[in-house]
Structure formats: structure tokens, C-alpha cells
Amino acid sequence: MIKTTGGTTSSVNPHHTADLLSAAVFARVFGSDALALLRRAAAAGVRIGISELRRGPRGRRGGER
């Protein structure tokens, strides 16, 4: 139990414990999938950036050499 400034005591709420356990299970189950999606999004961003660099300024064909 933790004593608060108002003189009342409070303890860990069972609902908070259940929420934390649910979050831990969710992270364990879906964490690797989320990381894979982030990697794919980063790779797509890199591909878009490279294609923009190769394209050069608007209206121009090919990249600078």
C-alpha cells in the first residue's frame, strides 16, 4: 500500500494489472510482426527516395552523373 498526500492509502488496481499483462502478451505475440512491418515500411521509403534521386529535377529525364 502507498500512502498519498491526502492521508488515504491506495494499492495497485487489479484492472491495471490485467491491462499490463494484456499489453505484455500483445507485445510478445504481435511484436515480431510489428517489427517486420516497420522494416518493410522503411525499405519502401528508401526505395522511394532512391527513385526520386534518380529521377532528378522535375521534367528532366535521368539522374545527374
Image: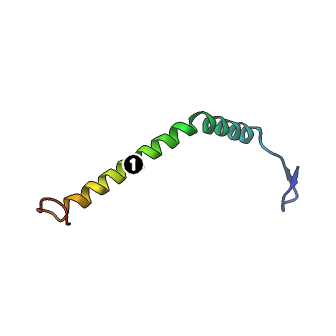
Residue at image point 72% right, 42% down: 16
SS at badge 1 = helix
Residue 54 image point, x, y percent: 23, 58
- From what the image shows, is residue 34 above or below residue 62? above
| Residue type indicated by callout 1 | Ala
Picture residue at 25% right of the left edge, 54% below the top:
51
Say which residue appears at 83% left-offset and 46% top-offset. Answer: 11
Write down the residue under mark 1.
Answer: 43
How many numbered badges does the structure rendering display? Answer: 1
What x and y, as percent, mark residue 38? 46, 46
Q: Is residue 31 above or below residue 42?
A: above
Picture quarter with the C terminus: bottom left
Residue in front for this viewpoint, 7 or 37: 37
Residue at the spot 41% in from the left edge and 50% down from the top edge:
42
**Which percent across, then down, holds residue 29?**
60, 33
Relative side of 26 to 12, left or right: left
Quarter of the rendering containing residue 5: bottom right
Disc 1 packing (10 Å; few <14; some 14–19; many ≥20): few
* Snapshot colouring: rainbow
Tell me if 9 is positioned left or right of 55 in this view: right
Q: Left of 26 or right of it: where is 14?
A: right
Instruction: Check the image and name the residue furthest to the front.
Output: 65
Residue 59 screen position, x and y as percent:
11, 62
Taking 55 as reference, is 14 left or right? right
Between residue 15 and residue 28, name the one nearer to us: 28
